[in-house]
Amino acid sequence: MYCPNCGKEYGQKVNFCCHCGTAMFPPQPVPKKPLTLSRTDKKIAGVCGGFAEYAELDPTIVRIVWLVSSIFSGVGFIAYLIAWIVMPKGPKLEKSSATVPAASAQPAPSKQPA
Ligand SMILES: [Zn+2]
């Protein structure tokens, strides 16, 4: 395998290039999560929460970065509004039906005489 960044060749599997530090994880078929507004973690519209879920980051970190970029450049504020408009809403939370499998709804088998 070769480092995609610096091109250094490795004979064995390595996670990081020891030459330049680039992550060299093998390509994994990770199901791509859709970028959606978060329903579970939202302060205004769920944009930051959605980005945090998408990127698997702490939503607080995303909010801080977004807020700082909004204050200092205004880009973050515009980007928030755009993201709010274009991002679809995340899936609705259905606690009752989705999580409980149908099999567990059946009554337990009653005692039968041997
Ligand atoms: Zn490298």
Image (cartoon, grey):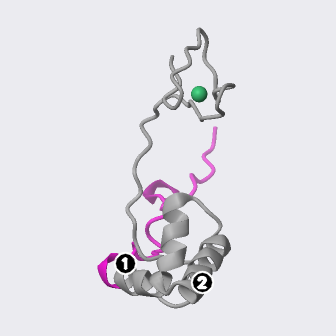
Q: Secondary structure at mark 2?
A: helix
The residue at the far left in this view is: 86
State which quarter of the image contains the C terminus. Answer: top right
Q: Residue under circle 2?
A: 67
* Residue 39 in sight in this render: no
Residue 13, picture quadrant: top right
Residue that label 1 marks: 89
Q: Position of residue 94 (x, y in %)?
A: 45, 75
The three-letter amino acid code for the residue at tag 1 is Lys
Q: Is 111 contained in the magenta span?
A: yes
Closer mark to the observer between disc 2 and disc 1: 2
Going by the numbered disc 2, the residue's amino acid type is Leu
Badge 1 marks a residue whose secondary structure is loop
How far apart marks 2 and 1 lie (CA) works out to 21 Å
Residue 19 drawn above or below residue 29: above
State the residue in front, 65 or 104.
Answer: 65
Q: Is residue 82 left or right of residue 20?
A: left
User: Does label 2 or label 1 sit earlier along the sequence?
Assistant: 2
Q: Residue at x 56, y 31 (%)?
A: 25
Image coordinates for residue 102, horizontal then vertical, percent: 44, 59
